[in-house]
Amino acid sequence: MLRIKNLSFSFNGKSKPIFYQLSMDVKAGEFVSIIGPSGAGKSTLFKLINGLLEPDEGEIQIKGNKSGSRLGSVGYMPQKDLLLPWRTVLENVILPCEILKEDWRKKMPVIQEWLSRFDLSQYENAYPDELSGGMRQRIAFLRTLMTGRDLLLLDEPFGALDSMTKRNMHRWLLGLWGELKKTVLFITHDLEEAILLSDRIFLIKDGRVYERKVHLARPRSTEQIYHSELIEMRKELEKLIHHDN
């Protein structure tokens, strides 16, 4: 689904490289988390993948495509939900269809089905300021799905939520994951979150990437945060983050 090969990038091409010869592959259907210290370049990597920035060297392939613009080829969800306050839940969800000049009315059966799966059916005529933070994030996630893209970039989507709401979002996403049939790259600073949700984890540090596979069996539940395997992996990641190379 995504191949990054020998990627190097620095702003203006003059400053110290944020990435140097960075490579990673993401398979179709995988959930991959990106972790690392603040300022390591996680959000910059997303901008490179979605075509907002271009690398100094190296290749970024999406679904094997080596050439052409990457803009619009992935679905992107930032930390803030960025819902339009003057539009209802349904009107926010159909926004990608309008941007792509698609007839959203023909998609209403699919949209209604997803609203139901996201537990939003009864709120489709509500406005964002009438909803909780968790509900707003579900709407933003559904809007990202409605782009129709197979690769989704989620940049700390639960980072601004309180711990209880975040745990509920984990429970909700784990329950829904099998139905999504999408490939996800997920930026987070929460190591428990990364381990619980992911198939693999990439740690970006000092312009390099370190890969760790998560061996927790699926389907998963939020109770697995107390399992010894998860706790040990969190310790390993903490040491890797704080170890001086």
Image (cartoon, grey):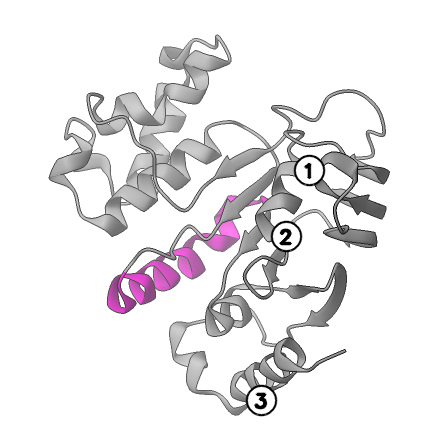
Q: Which residue is mark 3?
A: 232
Q: Residue at x 68, y 38 (%)?
A: 48
Q: Position of residue 233 (x, y in %)?
A: 60, 83
Tag 3, which secondary structure? helix
Residue depth check, mark 2 versus mark 1: number of the one nearer the observer: 2
Q: Is residue 83 visible?
A: yes
157 lies left or right of 205: left
Verify CB contact (< 8 Å) between mark 3 and mark 2. no
Q: Which residue is mark 1?
A: 48
Residue type marked 3: Glu
- Which residue extends farthest front? 14
Residue type marked 1: Leu
Q: Which residue is mark 2?
A: 41
Residue depth check, mark 1 versus mark 3: number of the one nearer the observer: 1
Magenta range: 162-183
First in sequence: mark 2 vs mark 1: 2
Tag 1, which secondary structure? helix
Tag 2, which secondary structure? loop
Q: Local crowd at mark 2 within 10 Å, few (<14), some, or many (≥20)?
A: some
Residue type marked 2: Gly
Quarter that holds the C terminus: bottom right
Q: Local crowd at mark 3 within 10 Å, few (<14), some, or many (≥20)?
A: few
Measure the alpha-carbon separation of dots 1 and 3. 32 Å
Q: Position of residue 215 (x, y in %)?
A: 65, 76
